[in-house]
Image (cartoon, helix red, strand yellow):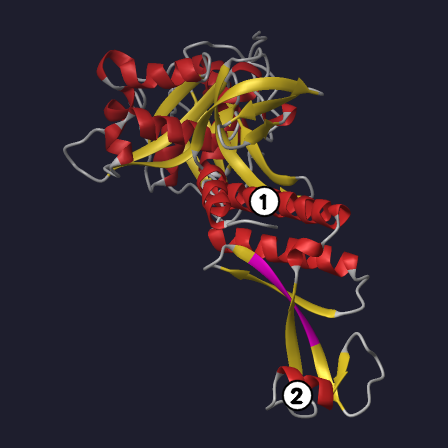
Amino acid sequence: MVGNLNHIIDQVVKDKGIDRGVLVEALESAVLSAANKKYRNTRDLEAHFNEEIGDVEVFEFVTVVDEVVDSYKEIDLAEAKEMDPEVEIGDSLGMMLEASGFSRIAAQTAKQVIIQKVREAEREGVYNEFKDRIGEVVNGIVRRYERGDLIVDLGRAEALLPSREQVPRENYRQSDRVRAYISEVKMSTKGPQIILSRIHPGLLISLFKSEVPEVAEGIVEIKGAVREPGNRAKIAVVSHDVDVDPVGACVGMRGSRVQNVVTELRGERIDIIPWSPDTARFACAALAPAEVSRVYIDEDGESLEVIVPDDQLSLAIGKKGQNVRLAAMLIGWRIDIKSETRAQEEEQEETGPDLTEAETVDVEVVDETSTDTEEVIAENPVVDSVEQDEDQG
């Protein structure tokens, strides 16, 4: 440990971005560890960094006593007074040791401790940087695959894009650029672990914030977003300015804004829906592009019975129940869909569910910007009961 260490410390602080105090503490700890190893932990030692000379000084402390029992930690009064005439019984006397007298093995131990402290400080710095960035969208470069998981280089750190957070049918190669949502940051035994996601609804919201200035400025608020990653998504928007159309702002001129988001999500269809505090009207909008005849509300059970024209039933349900499933997730209520014919039959038989009619909504075209016009019907696990009048594919 010979020579001025101030220059070395300053260089490490600059290159690694580590706090100077942390590095000084690491140096003191390293030298103390080497000293204790040399003296086999038989002495009471302390290490302190001297800023003026740029070196770590090691001090041995002994207690002044009348009769010495442990020669490594005690000193008699007569000998102590030769060093300090004012010393008294019970005082602790410090004597500086020659740090250059450490052996090569001790010096190597000091080096290892310094390296370990620097690594710990680097990991702590990365963790502190990214723990406050949860919810952000970051750009990275794919480095490698590990058992289906992607290792993504973010610059200062590597992140993990687990297979469960990847969109089905999305494939990446080494050196491909990827845009993902930071869903979790945690400290593990191997250092900070940054978890990315391509399926989180927050990715959809963040993309609209970057593409739509009105959303970024808070003029248009995204009240909710739900996704079936890779297939379809719905977002509910509301404007805080009467002169700004929330749906039009998100769609953009000739659909340019929403198309940029769709491209980033590799073709995922997006329905942009005007949010309403009225649950019935919100449900009608959420089921777009299907038309709704009327809605019955059960507020206690948080469920809706939606009646649609016979020719709109398959459109309201969507492919494999996708449309109604996403609508139910967006609203947070259970939705039962029935055709006009089936609803009339149940009314005549008086076997329908015991619901109170809260209001009937005459629905016009709710969402002209919906990107899904495919009329396909399939089994829907969310809807409790769906009656069909004809065999539809």
Q: Residue furthest front?
A: 82
The circle on residue 103 is none
Residue 186: name its quadrant.
top right
Which residue type does callout 1 highlight? Val
Point out the tag, 1 or 2, that comes first from the N-terminus.
2
Residue type (three-letter) at the residue carrying disc 2: Lys
Residue 83 image position (x, y, % from top left): 64, 82
**Camera sees residue 227:** yes
Q: Is residue 185 above or below residue 327?
A: below
Q: Compared with residue 179, is residue 62 higher up or lower down, i.e. above or below?
A: below
161 lies above or below 354: above
Asked which secondary structure carries label 1, the reply is helix
Which label lies toward us, 1 or 2?
2
Which mark is on residue 81? Answer: 2
Q: Residues within 10 Å of mark 2 (few under 14, many from 20)?
A: few
Q: Which residue is mark 1?
A: 118
Q: Is residue 34 left or right of residue 203?
A: right
In magenta segment, residue 187:
no
Q: Nearer the viewer, residue 214 or 243?
A: 214
Point out the stretch of residues depicted in magenta. Answer: 56-61
